[in-house]
Amino acid sequence: MRVVNLTPKSAFRNPQSRGVEMEKIRNYINGRWLDAKSGKTFQSTNPANKNEVIGLISKSGRDDVDLAVKAAREAYEGWRLTPAPRRGEILFRAAEFLLKKKEGLGRLETREMGKVLPEGLGDVQEAIDMGYYMAGEGRRLSGETVPSELPHKDMKSVRVPVGVFGVITPWNFPIAIPAWKLFPALVCGNTVVFKPASDTSVCAARFVEAFIEAGLPQGVLNLVFGSGGEIGEYLVSHPEIDAISFTGSWETGKRLEAVCGSMHRPITAEMGGKNSIIIMDDANLDLALDGAVWGSFGTTGQRCTAASRLIVHKKIYRVFIERFMEAASRLRLGDGLRKETDVGPLINETQFKKVLEYIEIGMKEGAKLVLGGKPYSKGICSKGYFIEPTIFGEVKPEMRIAQEEIFGPVVSVIKTDSLEDAIRIANGTVYGLSSAIYTQDVNNTAIAERDLESGIVYINAPTIGAEIHLPFGGIKQSGYGRKEAGGRGGALDTFSHWKVIYRDFSGRLQKAQIDKG
Ligand code: NAP
């Protein structure tokens, strides 16, 4: 196989060019693209065609992480003192760059992660939206000014950066999730060491390129590739890191929370979900069906907010499940770059095997397999990790397939006889990320809104579709620490500290709560 040793920039200009079989992707540390010190590499491949290698990636070790953290530490003072509106201008230019490159980036996402092209483009758009939004925050980042109880004294709160952030991201939104973290981290004045998911390393390099093109000073953003268990964990426990922002599985997140807890280090962790859609007997059924199909099988079910449980009122259960099966059976599997494809592959062999194991578990537990359940290998799909859209009926809420995150195109349909029971089932897992209800009764919507235990609730829409300017994140086992996205109450609170300043210009000692002025 020919290795094309292109600079990231020229490789980006023509990612599909003939003869370019794979790109060499290096770490980006202190303003330079560098091979890992060991010289080792690993491959990133196309999950729709495992023979297609997308990139040959530097496999970093601890010394590469040390170098990246040192660069971020050294750049911190200069970046912290750069006026926030100037920081925002750089981020604005990065968003403009992403907009210019949107089509190429979207196609790259489809090749490296497998999601269908419209979703790949949507992922890039989310990053652009976050870029513009956070660029504007450069001129706000506002605190409070409040009157003092004493004369000749003023007081205010201001946001200050936290320091050097370690950022670790998953593969399912390879550009949007890094954008959720990097744009707010940088506008707040932090510097960053970014370790992306190994499976989507090329997307991460292309994304970081936007910041370089925008003129971000060297050392402010550093990128290291390599195994999470090796360099990710080392980064999280590195003595020169001030805080961690992580998105990924519960298993990894829980482990990292323990590491950070023992070091008194702030961590925000966004993790898995077991999200449900409640469909009441008065729902607009056509709308609910569209939402159930998109929520369950969009991104091949590989969204943290994917609907993996449909809780359906018994009065409409039979008709719903028949129509749902019929709609899901029409979904076409294939390479996401093809216009006709509705559902792409699973990300990798591990995920492929895990999903098949859960299908086995579901059958052993006595759930009724009503659609799919097998790998799909017709035509071009023989080269990728495809599994048929799979529906289990007659699922009991306590079954493992209704409790554990599968992260694939597998959905459990559960019967309910009332709103109260439906909410009890929806809340009956360790997760609490996203939930939804389809009903036309305004009172039902109010009760669901109040009682569903999840960070996000959708009314008459599926469990997916968050917008970037409100906080995003889960409760219970789905989230830990502060929130992603949004401004105040969300990302800005994650990536900055409050500092409170009291200024006494009376020229004498005044005692709060004691002197009456
Ligand atoms: P993962 O295995 O936990 O990996 C996430 C990231 O952590 C990757 O960069 C991974 O590196 C790294 N990592 C793995 N083990 C590590 C360790 N011991 N120390 C430090 N870093 C480590 O999760 P995933 O399979 O990529 O992503 C799927 C999961 O993410 C699902 O559970 C999904 O629900 C969740 N997710 C949550 C949200 C949300 O906002 N709540 C959004 C998207 C996804 P490598 O790639 O090198 O292994």
Image (spheres, rainbow, N blue to C red):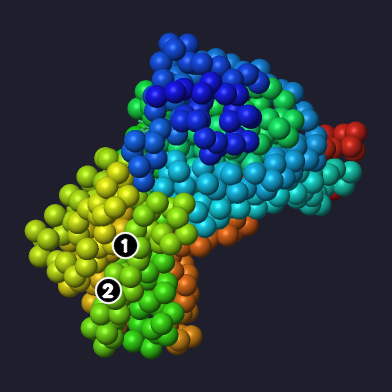
Query: How many labels were placed on the picture?
Result: 2
| Residue at image coords 16%, 59% | 362
Where on the image, by quarter, is ligand 1?
A: top left
| Residue at image coords 47%, 52% | 337
Spatial CA span between label 1 and label 2: 15 Å
Provide the residue designation for mark 1.
Answer: 308
Query: Marks 2 and 1: in contact by CB < 8 Å?
Result: no
Name the mark on residue 438.
none
Distance from mark 2 CB to nearest ligand 1 atom below 8 Å: no
Corner quadrant of residue 96: top right
Corner quadrant of residue 495: top right
Tell me the SS state at disc 2: helix
Provide the residue designation for mark 2.
Answer: 325
Please state which of residues 186 and 40 is positioned toward the viewer in this rendering.
Answer: 40
Nearest to viewer (mark 1 / mark 2): 2
Please state which of residues 497 and 186 is positioned toward the viewer in this rendering.
Answer: 186
Compared to residue 27, the image places residue 140 above or below, namely below
302 displayed left or right of 486: left
Q: Position of residue 261 (x, y in %)?
A: 42, 33
Local packing at callout 2 (Cα closer than 10 Å; few below 14, some 14-19, many 20+) is: some
Kindly identify the amino acid type of the residue bearing the numbered disc 2.
Answer: Met
Q: Position of residue 234 (x, y in %)?
A: 42, 22
| Residue at image coords 42%, 74% | 290
Q: Position of residue 331 (x, y in %)?
A: 35, 66
Compared to residue 447, the image places residue 185 above or below, namely above
